[in-house]
Amino acid sequence: MNRYSEPDPELLQQFFNLEQSGWKGKEGSAINCRPETQAFYKEIAKGASAHGTFCLHSLEANSRMIAGAFSVATSDGFFPIKVAYDETLKRGGPGHLLFNAIVTECLEKHIPELFFGGTDEHYKSLWTQEKVALYNAFVFSADIRSQLAYRVRHHLLSPLGKLRWFVRQRYLQSKNGASKRRSISHPQTGREVQAKATQPAPARESRSGVHSS
């Protein structure tokens, strides 16, 4: 496992290519799929590096990156912004090996929190059951098309979305039981790092602003 604190262009491109090689590339949502998205993440890496918070973990085999995490790390928390792995090696769990190394680093550096962020994905539940709410916000302008879009979303789509959210929460509760706080302890020092994921929460829209429920 290698850890890099400088955003070397060749290294970043290796990570971008790795992410594009999987399902994100097929769906067109990988960083490499849009030049402006690639430029955006390069700027994040550059800015974070200037403040000493950028890091890129690379799990390598035969001199090739097979899993990587594009992250921002502070003394208060570790935030993997983008994670990628070679999906042809999925059975070997390269992504979990990567996160095991990240958790170990958090423990050794006394970083108290590892925040997975993003969407509610199954692999995150293997590391933690604690979740924080993730809100979506929508702002509508005053023109006719926006007013129509607001009414459709507010009176039709929003109630359906809340119903879907409620059904999903009941399903997850019945499947996993009540959410429990889980800490990960270092086997030698006994120190703990708190891992957190996110779960979608319903939101309310307003023509004059945004209100979260």
Image: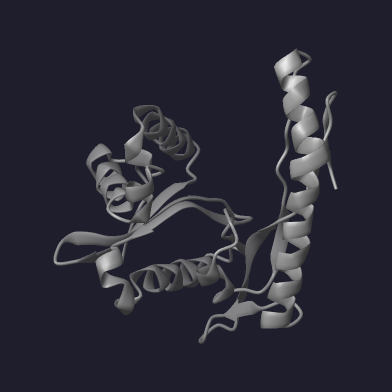
Residue that appears at 38% across and 50% down: 24
Q: Is residue 56 above or below residue 113?
A: above
Residue that appears at 58% across and 66% down: 110
Q: Nearer the viewer, residue 91 or 116?
A: 91
Residue that appears at 53% across and 65% down: 109
* Res 68 → quadrant: bottom left
* Res 201 → quadrant: bottom right
Q: Is residue 12 above or below residue 144?
A: below
Q: Where does the image place residue 46, in percent across and percent down from the top left?
A: 41, 34
Q: Nearer the viewer, residue 81 or 49?
A: 81
Q: Is residue 144 above or below residue 10?
A: above
Left or right: where does residue 81 sit relative to residue 195?
left
Q: Residue furthest bottom?
A: 187
Q: Nearer the viewer, residue 2 or 63?
A: 63
Left or right: where does residue 144 sit relative to residue 127?
right
Q: Nearer the viewer, residue 73 or 168?
A: 168
Left or right: where does residue 65 sit relative to residue 158?
left
Q: Where does the image place residue 84, in percent across and percent down from the top left?
A: 37, 57
Q: Is residue 188 above or below residue 173?
A: below
Q: Where does the image place residue 57, in percent across and percent down from the top left?
A: 36, 58
| Residue 140 seen by the camera | no
Q: Residue furthest left?
A: 62
Q: How is the image coloured?
A: one colour
Q: Where does the image place residue 171, in percent across and percent down from the top left?
A: 71, 74
